[in-house]
Each structure stands twice: as C-alpha cells, then as structure tokens.
Amino acid sequence: MPLLFLLRLQHEQLPVRVASPEELRHVSVLLATGLIEAEILAPKSTARYAASRVATVVRITEAGRAEIAKMVDVPEPAKTAVQFARGLRLMM
C-alpha cells in the first residue's frame, strides 16, 4: 500500500534509492499524487515500453506530511536500508 510506504519513508534519511518493483509502483503513485518528490530513472533500452528500475525519493512534500498526520494507529513498517556513498540509501 503506497500510504504505508509513505510512512516508512518518513523514518528514512532522504534521499533514498528504491529498486524493488513493488516499491517503484508505490513511488510512482506517491509522486503522481504529489505526496513526494522523486526521480524515476528508466533503464537504457531500445524497447518502447521499458519498465523503470530505480527511483530516488528526494523528499516528502507538505501534502505528504499532511497525509501522514491524518493516519493514526497504523503499525510502523520494518526498516531495512543499506547506506551508499554520497548519502544515498537503498531500501530493501
């Protein structure tokens, strides 16, 4: 669920890199609804409809923070991440 993913992002040090297909879908939905700022990178491919492989979430917007504030009594998701150079983190 994208909103649970948004809650998870709240507890991460941003920017964070996302690579799993399910989380990429969450990033896409949250970006489209204006709840986060992110960059979704498509792989270099000659295919017309190549799937995205990596996204970098830059920040949670004010609208995203307002949405988080509306959610109460939602269990906190488990946090797992790997730290990379230049401050990027990969969520797993």
Image (spheres, helix red, strand yellow):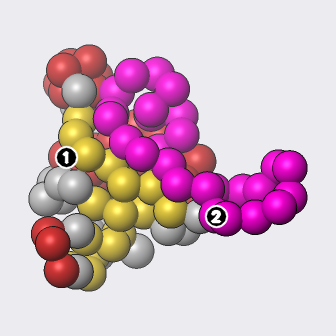
At x 45%, y 55%, the residue is: 55
The span picked out in magenta is 27-52
Left or right, 88 with reference to 92: left
Residue on which the image places disc 1: 10
CB atoms at circles 1 and 2 under 8 Å apart? no
For residue 43, which numbered disc appears in the image? 2
Q: What element carries label 1?
A: helix
Query: Which kind of residue does numbered mark 1 sit on?
Result: Gln
Q: Where is residue 23 in the image (x, y as percent from the top left)?
A: 51, 56
At x 67%, y 65%, the residue is: 44
Q: Is mark 2 on a helix, strand or loop?
A: loop
Q: Where is residue 40 in the image (x, y as percent from the top left)?
A: 50, 49
Q: Nearer the viewer, residue 70 or 10?
A: 10
Q: Which of 88 and 64 is in front in this view?
A: 88
Residue 88 highlighted magenta (yes or no): no
Q: Position of residue 77 (x, y in %)?
A: 31, 59
Mark 1 to mark 2 CA distance (whole Å): 27 Å
Left or right, 56 with reference to 10: right
Q: Quadrant of residue 78?
A: bottom left
**Quadrant of image for the C terminus:** bottom left
Which of the two labelled residues, at mark 1 and mark 2, occupies the earlier sequence position?
Answer: 1
Q: Where is residue 75 in the image (x, y as percent from the top left)?
A: 28, 50
